[in-house]
Amino acid sequence: MAASRARSALDPGGKPALKAFAAAAGRFAAGLAAVLVVGLIVVVALAIALYRSYAADFVPPEEAAVNRPSAGARVYDRNGVLLYQYVDDREGLRNPVRLSDVSAAFLAATIATEDFNFFSNPGVNHKGLVRAALENLNPFQDDKDLLEGAGGSSITQQLVKNVYISPEDRTKRSIDRKMREVVYALELTKRYPKKQILEWYVNQINYGGVYSGVEAASQGYFGKPAKDLTLAEAALLAGIPQSPASYDPRTSLQAAIERRNDVLALLASHPRIAIGQDVYFVPDQAEIQAAMQEPVEVLPPRFPIEAPHFVLTYVGPQLEAMYGRSAVLHDGLIVTTSLDLELQRRSQEILERWIQAFEASSNTHNGAMMIMTPDNGEVLVMIGSRDYYREDIDGQVNNLLARNSPGSSFKPFVYLTTFLELGWSPGTIIQDSPITYREVNGDVFQPQNPTVNSYRGNISIRDALGNSLNVPAFKAAQIVGVDKVVQQAKKLGFTTLVGQYGPSIAIGGVDLTPAELTYGYTVLANGGVMVGQDAVAPGRPDLSQLQPVSILRVTDARGEVRFDIERERRKRRILPEEHAFLVTNILTDPRATCVTFGCGGIQVPGYQVAVKTGTSQPYDPRGPNRGKIGETWAFGYTRDFVVGVWAGNSDNSPLVNILSTSISFRAMRDAMLAAYAGRPQTPWEQPAGVARSRTCMHAPALPSTVFAPAPGAPALRTGASRPGQCADDWVVRGGNDGAARQEPPPLEVPPGMRAVDRRTGMPAEPTTPTEFVELRPVETPEAPQPAPQQPEPTRAAPAGGSAAIASPGGGSVSGAVVVRGTASSPDMLYYRLEYSGPSGVWSSIGQWSTPVVSDALATWSTAGLPPGQYTLRLTVQDAVRGPIVATVTVNVSR
């Protein structure tokens, strides 16, 4: 019955029902169409609104810094040798060029690979977008998450991504990012010609490594401008942007070759490729086949660094303080520095050689060196560590800027303060006798000389400083006042002196940097004048101070001179020339070093160099490192150069079996010779304000126990010394030293006689105190004799004295060698044992003041010495008879 009714509704007799059905369907269709139209209108309206919303945020490329040059500062040495080029880690190197300066083959390869229809599309790749939409928005694909399909980006879209999308968001797939990318690409195409967009693109895209843009990549990989790229080179570069890390020819050569050939195959598949409006590149099949066979030859990375401590930890912070980091990374600065790279390299070799020579026996693994020219305040050499790249020695630490105890190398500045504040002079007598210093906290400290429990009694400042005696320097600091020492040192550039100190400041009880010590010595070398530039380095506590010159000139990419040292160099007189001369005269006097170093033992052959060494000890008098060495130092200066050397460990682990004359002095000496390279030195000049005079002045004697004054209390000025001892020496004319002086009559030497320093047996000089001058007959020259092939075993000793080495008596030795013999004389000052090996340089084993007769003299450690022939030398120094010497030759074996 139901079926019959259904049929009746459709038969001709059911026309009213059919009409009703048709009408209902019509109304439904009309309604649906209306809904669709309204929906479409809504969608279009929303799309337009969304487009306008994104477009409103669009920033013109010029304002977005598209193709901004990203040429990091290039840092050169004083002779134009490149030391380093700074690179922005995010933008790399970029050197934008005009499209007309880019190879046509490269443009064709880029368009064929990235966006064949670039010159005809509206900024987006329609086919790519559809394919990407199907892949990205297909919910049924199992192997990819939503929005993780292909990109389908046109050249214009890729430009948008690199200019407008942050690096963090470029790898994220989102509808918002993709919509913004499309809108911006359409806006770019609407507002700018295609040629301009293509030019922006080839100058903006990353081509592997640090290269952004085709010009930087072409120069970096092939050493040529982009306009000169061959077909093979053009195809290789054009293939890199798809995956810069995967196709970098330096790190993935085979992948880069395969990618290049894919790009060449794409070129071959097109009869012609539009590279401009009505401009086409026509591939040549034969050339393409030949290009596929070409080997890939790229240059090594051009960003090695020379003098890394100088560039990165010294010059770099100054440049950023002067111009800001952005300028350093982007403004194309050309920085000419004061560094002499050739001298830097020679100095590095010298430092390495001497560290290696003593490393095994002393536990010294690191070192640092600085060379300056005092007359202009310029840094010629800055070696912050033995090897910047060695992590096991903390090689990246610039030890020239690290604070450590300088040992005795600060003593000249203590005595300088006494000259300025108290009117002392090199001939002033100070008492070298035991003293105990009790700190405020109750700790007791007893300074010791280099030879423990050895005291000289009354001694001149000349001999006390020249021999680096600790007790007189300690007393000098106590007498003049530590506050005065600190004040004077700050004037000389010691900017790290910001704490509270005691008299031990004179012997290492302070932390200073090798750089500031070197700079301080330039003031002495320059006659009391500091030369440098206004402080710009960050972290300096006193920006009113000058600092060493490390930058000579800075220009930018436009050729504008931003800095010229000739306009910025400053000179300031810090102390009178006469007082600088007094210190220099002591430190250049070979006879002032006889007790500790041997007469002339720390001289530089062929040059008159003021030398001061230092040895510090770990400050733990009751700890496990008691008596060990912290580090060693050596400073040498002339009017032409100042050389500072530090040897130790960056982690402050202690040293053993080493002296300041082992690594530090030898490296300083050899670096000074390398700096001169055989040239004559500028002679020292005597200021008009100094004169020779007999000094009968004594430093006040201190009680045997001194208590540290309370904070703010005046320095100790008590006690008096024994009168009656005088010395001839230099003084400042009119100086207020509280002592009567008179010019001594000139020494008359009768014919046939000669003046001799009876302490050393060497010819007397004007600086020799008269009480030590002895007249002796002039010896008649004998006929020349051939030089002996081997050193004589023993030199005959004058009556009453003996120097003899009983064992070893020759042959081979190794390990710890006990040296036995006799060292004795009626007026013995000391005996000293030294050795000389294949290098011909004498090294000290030790020095003692107690006579020895037929017994052990010392233990000589040969561990770490290169095998070969060595000479042992025993010197007995007699105050009346002079030196008594014995030698013996042995072979050191493993």
Image (tube, rainbow, N blue to C red):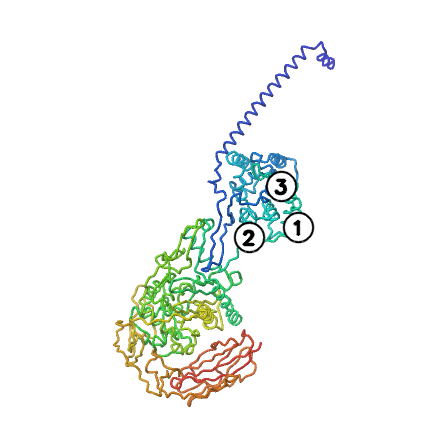
Q: Is residue 555 above or below residue 62?
A: below
- Mark nearer the viewer, 3 or 1: 3
Mark 3–mark 1 contact, CB under 8 Å? no
* Label 2 – label 1 distance at C-alpha: 21 Å
Q: Name the side, left or right, on which 537 lies relative to 168.
A: left
Which residue, given by chain and number where applicable, does mark 3 sit on?
282
Q: Report the residue that reaches farthest toward the top.
A: 13
* Three-letter amino acid code of the residue under disc 2: Gly
Name the secondary structure under disc 1.
helix
Q: How would you rate the neighbour count of disc 2 (Cα within 10 Å): few for under 14, some for 14-19, many for 20 or more? A: some
The image position of residue 437, as x and y in percent, is: 36, 71
- Residue type, mark 1 in image: Gln
Q: Which residue is nearer to you in this view: 390 or 503?
A: 390
**Label 3 element class:** loop
Q: Quadrant of residue 262?
A: top right
Tell me which amino acid carries mark 3.
Answer: Val
Front position in the image: 844 or 510: 844
Q: How many marks?
A: 3
User: On the image, numbered disc 2 is attached to which residue?
Assistant: 223
Q: Position of residue 431 (x, y in %)?
A: 33, 76
**Which numbered circle lies on residue 293?**
1
Q: Secondary structure at mark 2?
A: loop
Q: Is residue 422 visible?
A: yes
Who comes first in sequence, dot 3 or dot 2?
2
